[in-house]
Image: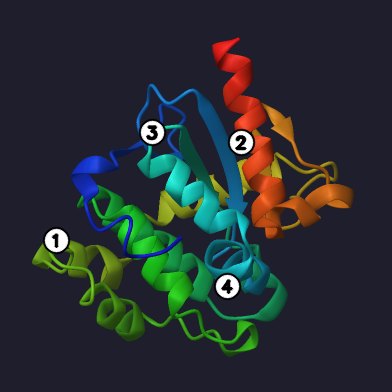
Amino acid sequence: MGVTAYANVEAVPERLAADGTTIVVGDPKAPVTVGLLEDPRCPVCEEFERTGGGGPVLEEAVVRRVARAQYTMASFLDDRLGGGGSQRAVNALRAALEAGKFAEFHAVLYANQPEEETDGFTTARLLDLAGTVPGLRSPAFDSAVKTMKYRDFVTASEKAYEAKGTEKGKGPGTPTAEIDGYVIPASANGVLFDADAFTKILSVAQSEHTS
């Protein structure tokens, strides 16, 4: 999601849901709920968030309090490609949430996503990127990133992602979107990369709450 619209964090509240793995961004009273499954190393997630159409549309809807976004952050690409960049990034995102800066840091990570195979989200790189988010770097944040303080969250979040799949131990493709409980199937996920189509979906979902 773009950095600019989320610059005013007071306008975009964020919290950890009661399940302990879902990160909610947006007004809790927003009528439309959009669930997203993402891996920080996933280039298709980066496409969705930055240039694919759906991400910017969702960002605008969240800022306008039409929708709230619910993120389940996976880290399966570490096992598939080697390394630990996804796990380190998810841990850092959880630390950013503790500082009230998840949405901004999430945007920064996708704007600076390394090549999928390079495992570029090192501890040093994550701290450097966090330095571009005003107010995020602190002794507590830095320590959480360096020590993998939220390792249990990373593991639980990956398991929550895997539970969404149809095969045991394997989650669906990323990104996967769920709108008001309806999972957009892989065969139709092209709508995630079409701004007009995604706008229409959100509009229909909103109208169902007002009819």
User: Mark 3: which amino acid?
Assistant: Arg
What is the total number of numbered labels drawn onto the structure image?
Answer: 4
Residue for badge 4: 41
Which numbered disc, 2 or 1, marks the residue closer to the eye?
2
Residues tagged 3 and 4 counted as in contact (Cβ below 8 A): no
If you read the primary sequence from the N terminus, does the residue marked by circle 3 or circle 4 appear first? 4
Residue for badge 1: 140
Image quadrant occupied by the C terminus? top right
Q: Residues within 10 Å of mark 2 (few under 14, many from 20)?
A: many
Q: Which mark is residue 65?
A: 3
Which numbered disc, 1 or 3, marks the residue closer to the eye?
3
Residue for badge 2: 202
If you read the primary sequence from the N terminus, does the residue marked by circle 4 or circle 1 appear first? 4
Which numbered disc, 3 or 4, marks the residue closer to the eye?
3
Residues tagged 1 and 3 counted as in contact (Cβ below 8 A): no
Residues tagged 4 and 1 counted as in contact (Cβ below 8 A): no
Residue drawn at x 46%, y 41% as measured from the top left: 61
Q: State the separation of the CA atoms marked 2 and 4.
A: 26 Å
At mark 2, the secondary structure is helix
Q: Is residue 28 above or below residue 109?
A: above
Q: State the separation of the CA atoms marked 2 and 1.
A: 38 Å
If you read the primary sequence from the N terminus, does the residue marked by circle 2 or circle 3 appear first? 3
